[in-house]
Amino acid sequence: MTMTVPSDRRPPAPAARRRLVLRVSTRHDVEAGLQTTIALASALRGELSALFVEEEASLHAVALPFQTLMDFTGGLVTLAPGRIETAMRGEARACRRLLAAAAEQARLQWSFRSLRGDALHLLHQEGIAGDILVLNLDRFGLSGGEALARAGQLAPPGGGVLLLPPKVSRKAQPPAAQPVLTLGQDATPAAPLRGLAEHLAQALGSPLGHCTIAGPASVPALAGELARARLLLMRLESPLFDAPDSLRQIGFALRAPLLAIRTDQAG
Amino acid sequence: MTGENDDIREGGHRPLDAERLRRVTDPASLEGIDAAGRTAAAGLIGQPRAYDAIRFGSGTRAPGFNLFAMGLPGTGRHSAIRAFLEAQAADARPPDDWVYVNNFDDPGKPRAFCLPSGAGMRFRAAMDDLIADLGVTIPALFESDEYKARRGALDQEFEEQQETAFAEVNKAAQEKSIAIMRTPVGFAFAPKREGEVVKPEEFGELPEAERDRIQADIKALQEAMKQVLQQMPRLEKARRDGIRKINNELVGGTVEAAIGEVRGQFHDMPAIQDHLDAVARDLVGNLKIFLEAAATAAEAPVPTNGVPAEREPKLHRYAVNVIVGDHERDHRPGEGRKPGPKQAPGEKQEPGEQQEPETGEGARGAPVIWEPNPTYGNLVGRVEQASRMGALTTDFTLIRPGALHRANGGALILNARDLLLQPFAWDALKRSLRSGAITITPLGEQLNLLSTISLEPDPIPLDVKVVLIGDRTTYYLLLRLDPDFPDLFKVQADFDDDFARSPDNAALYATLLMDLAAREGLRPVDNGALARMIDETARFAGDSQKLSLQVGQVADILREADYWAGESGRDGITAADVARAVDQRRHRGDRIRLRMQEAITRDIVLIETDGAVVGQVNGLAVLQFGGQSFGRPSRITASARLGTGRVIDIEREVELGGPLHSKGVLILSGFLAAHYALDVPVSLSASLVFEQSYGGIDGDSASSAELYALLSALSEVPLDQSFAVTGSVNQLGQVQAIGGVNEKVEGFYDICAARGLTGRQGVLIPAANVVHLMLREDVVEACSAGRFAVHAVHSIDQGIEILTGRTAGSRDGAGRFPPDSVNGLVEARLRSFAEMRRGFARKEVGEGHDDDRPI
């Protein structure tokens, strides 16, 4: 299902407009990532596309003969047949409402689709050139390091992946004093990344900074700084993405949204 | 009785001299009056008994010795009482202040405590300053690097605990190739193969041992997950405790230091010290209020300095509501409740917003409060409610004082009628006086009409002198019908309606009028005007030897005279202005009188003012319309024939006659029986009627006129229609005093004057009413010129002689009246009736009837 705001209520999107594609499976995902995603979409003058995924894995899991679910307070729940599908459809409607309200308040174009399948696979399929795919990380899915490692595979040409760590979900919108930080092995960010970072910092009203990641061992010392950032930026072309240990350390320290982006075509 | 009627007794029947028709004050007698010197006494002139009662009632503090001041309206009860009480209160100790503060243990029951006079406003200001300061200081503390570092460390520790707990479950799940997935209804657990969740059909193909293992692993993981999830609330609580501890350590010192300054200002007031302890405890536990307020202030379009308590509803909890303080008592005479400087009349005060302190004359001495609108709420106070987000809420800052609060420690003046007309107000006053405390219970709550949140404020001890002002009817009704009343209002101050017209009192009255003119900015009053005013005052009293104490009426005449003086271009008020004021006042209310007079002069209502008629006389009645009263003649006729001794009062027969009128007519029967033909039964059937009277008649002032008509009918001697008659009569034939003598004389005079005075016309009045004569000047002038006359009579015999021109007649030694006298003719007629009746009785007995029923 795809919906867009009627054209008489919104000006037509410019051709170069970026899309932020948000994968959601529960309203928790929407609540967790929406503020950051909208802030970034506004800064990039982009639009928002939500992809509600009825996770096949979840459907398989609940179809197992012995399966019981555990609710969020630790109680065991036995599902009646068809209950999970009903719940997912209800969740999709709730997600759509939340997304629509937030996007319209921010005057962003938005669309919403509901699909069934593997979330990462569908997200990868959905992405087109220039898109930024938004991944909410939860405690039991991909770790930060794993997600960073997969970012290069997922990011479409000229696009990127925005990783939202679980911590982001509990915080209100960060104050403007928190910086936009670029990460890289060099002492200064590469020019394309710097241009994007400057643009985002200005749009978000945040100061701009850079962290040099000399190697995996240097990351723990930078953890506090990384945690206080409003947004982290990395080039997918960075040699760091060829250094799994460094990525694992960065993922472990990830407390702020991180945008891994292809700068070879990024403006 | 003086010798004023000696001429009548001597048979001369001379009318009263002009000087006895209106007692005139000589302006020269008012020379040398010092208004300033007597002004102080003028407030309670002629009221020594009431003055003593007020002094006694206000002086004794024993319970129940409240005052009821009764008397006619306009006798100066209110102003006199108020002036007396204020003078007395000026030297009294100012009462304590009373404040309401939040009860942090039970906000529904605000605490009240008393403070020395003036301390309430200082305490409120100190608390406002404290909260404003903390509104800046506390948010700043939370922005400090120190706080952020400690708070960040705590949050991180909490998050790491969470992460560690979940990570252990996650690690165990990965080791056992179990996927944990978040679904809309909870966490799902499933085995994984090569990174993918095993489908149900694949799971069914697994060896049974493998399936059992997977199930056991999942069960173990679920148990571990359950442990983690169930410890989350505990971790969260630990985090909150940790935050509270940091807050206490960081902010506690600052709060205590700030509160310490307030403590120092009120170190000798234990109630404030206790309250500040509670404030300190509450502040540290509710720091987020300040942070939210600061955030709100930061978003405000206009920058604010600090966080004023009134802007943030949650900070009201630390405010001080001065329910009784200096500003509450600053009242001017007649103002009643006074809105605060920030508050226009009728405008509602916002929660937490309080009046600014005022200082002034009202701050000194004990309060004397006049509440002109004694509703339940205005009397005992109220708990107002404010609309927030569509819901009605309240707190202790919305407690409003009543008149009892403001008068506490002093005196409260209320109009009894106004009080009794207000639902539940009288009961509330009695309850407060009985219990010695003011308890604010919202009326809606008391009647179970409202279910909104309300408060149960601490009662406030009451020590007040209540003065009710009312009329005598109200006083005696309360005395008879309300058993609580005598216990609660033990002192009556009975204001006289009038006082003696002595030279001293006249002078005193003159000073009162001069003082009034000075106070109200009227033109100066000359002695002629003062003298004329005093004459009018006697007219108001309806007595030439009294002065009315209904000062309000008299003052109105003076005010009107001032207007007419201005109209005439005079700088001062003269006797002519007073006379014009009186005339104009009469003229304004004269329409009905003139219409009635017109009906008579056009012979629509039949009144003879000349000639002589048997059995017909002009009676006089007084009609009152609003503030105007005037006399109106009425034709009274009588007829007589043989009968069984009944005098029929036609008014009574048709139920138009009141009981007093009927009594007067029955007295006539007694007079006839006692006066004539004592040796034979009265065999008379007479009827009396007020001709062309279509409304109710009461009073016995026409009984002498009725008797004259009856005697004329019996004697067949015509009565002179040039006269009108008033006066009641007793069984002995004595004419007794009546009311409204001036209006009655003037009423007949006006008819005669309209038709043309003949010189024979006049009015017969009871001799006892001569002292009441204060006739209009035009009537007096006519009498003086011999064109009209007022005759004072003591007895029916005197009156009948004037009306018939015949001798009334006295019994001789043989007990017989002279045959040609009126009495002789009456007795002869009655004997003839008796003889005729006897003849009828013999005939009826012979025919077997027995119908002889002597009276």
Image (cartoon, coloured by chain):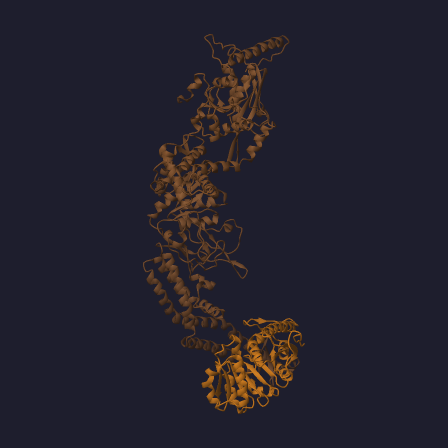
Q: Quadrant of the N terminus of chain B?
A: top left
Name the residue nearer the viewer: B180 or B252. Answer: B252
**Which quadrant holds residue A154?**
bottom right
Q: Which chain is brown?
A: B
Residue at the far front: name it.
B569
Per the rendering, the colour in which chain A appears is: orange
**Can residue B189 be spotted in the picture?**
yes
**Image location of residue B307, percent across then percent down:** 44, 66
Classify residue B148 as left or right of residue B839: left
Classify residue A3 as left or right of residue B351: right
**Image location of residue B559, percent across then percent down:** 45, 41
**Which quadrant holds residue B275?**
bottom left
Name the residue nearer the viewer: B581 or B196. Answer: B581
Classify residue A39 as left or right of residue B27: right
**Residue B450 sits above or below residue A57 on the image:** above
Name the residue nearer the viewer: A263 or B543. Answer: B543
Residue at 35 percent of width and 36 percent of height: B31
**Residue A88 sits above or below residue B624 on the image:** below
Classify residue B124 as left or right of residue A149: left
**Can residue B175 be spotted in the picture?**
no
**Image location of residue B400, percent across then percent down:** 45, 54
Q: Quadrant of the C terminus of chain B?
A: top right
**Image location of residue B804, percent across then percent down:** 52, 17
